[in-house]
Amino acid sequence: MQTVIVPVDFSETSLNAARYAVQLLTGHYGVNMILHHVYEKDTQLGEVTQKLEDLKNELMELGIVKTQLVAEKGDDFIEELEKLARHRDAELIIMGVAGKSAIAQSLMGSNTLKMVKKKVCPVLIIPEDARYHDVKNVMLTTDLEDVTSSTPSVPIRKILKTFKPHLFVMNVDNTHYVSLTEEAQAEKAKLKEMFKDFKPEFFFLGLNDVEEGINQFAQDKKIDFIIIIHKEQNLFSKLFVKSRTKKLIYQSQIPLLVIHE
């Protein structure tokens, strides 16, 4: 990776994401981390610039990453972030999400979900209580449907090559009774070939509650972050629109990497 954007509004949620980001990226030379803030009034520029400098100095105590500060005037945070990501050809955005209250969810949470839907680049969502751990175990969720055309293998492989974790591939489906169907076996074989360099380990859970299955598996296997492929018309895309599954974002302590098909 070369360019990673970390938007900050100086809330504790965004500051936690920035701390997580610098620890995650330390040691990966060639990465340029951009701390990005959008302000509304000209009179705020001096104060914002100083706060960004102070944050940069604070983060240097946690890790060493080439860091650039970008403060932009604008009325729409998401619009400015999207423009910056496209202009700089960002490969990753790392941002926080708050989940302790409905108010928190409606503010930073909604911005994070809005950015995910922009489909600019992968978004690593850092829960407000998440603390950095070395990336050793990563879980890729799959619905086992047309995996060849719907799995964005290039950005996923780039992430896996960067951090070199153990890869778990997990599918939750209440139709898994005794064994997989022939169709599911065929899709599994395609995924296995797609990520053969990373020696993926497959798991299949026959549950109705996708959210519960993912969370429990992640805890059992000590997963460091979960990769979700965001599709327009599948169960995992509903993660962002149904309150039942939003809990996976708002209440999980495990970062979620969202990549569009």
Image (cartoon, rainbow, N blue to C red):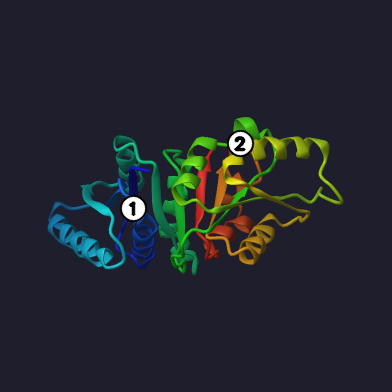
Q: Residue at x 72, y 57 (%)?
A: 209
Please tell me the numbered disc located at residue 160: none
Nearer to the camera, 126 or 193: 193
Q: Based on the displayed image, in which of its 4 quarters is residue 219 positioned?
A: bottom right
Q: Relative to 92, is 125 above or below?
A: below
Whole-percent x, y for residue 55 in the image: 24, 63
Q: Residue at x 61, y 36 (%)?
A: 194
Please tell me the numbered disc located at residue 6: 1
Q: Which residue is mark 2?
A: 194
Please give left or right for residue 118 compared with residue 167 in the image: left
Chain-order first, disc 1 or disc 2: 1
> Identity of the amino acid at label 2?
Met
> Identity of the amino acid at label 1?
Val
Most extreme residue toward the top is 149
User: 10 Å neighbourhood of mark 1: few (<14), some, or many (≥20)?
Assistant: many
Please give left or right for residue 13 compared with residue 227 in the image: left
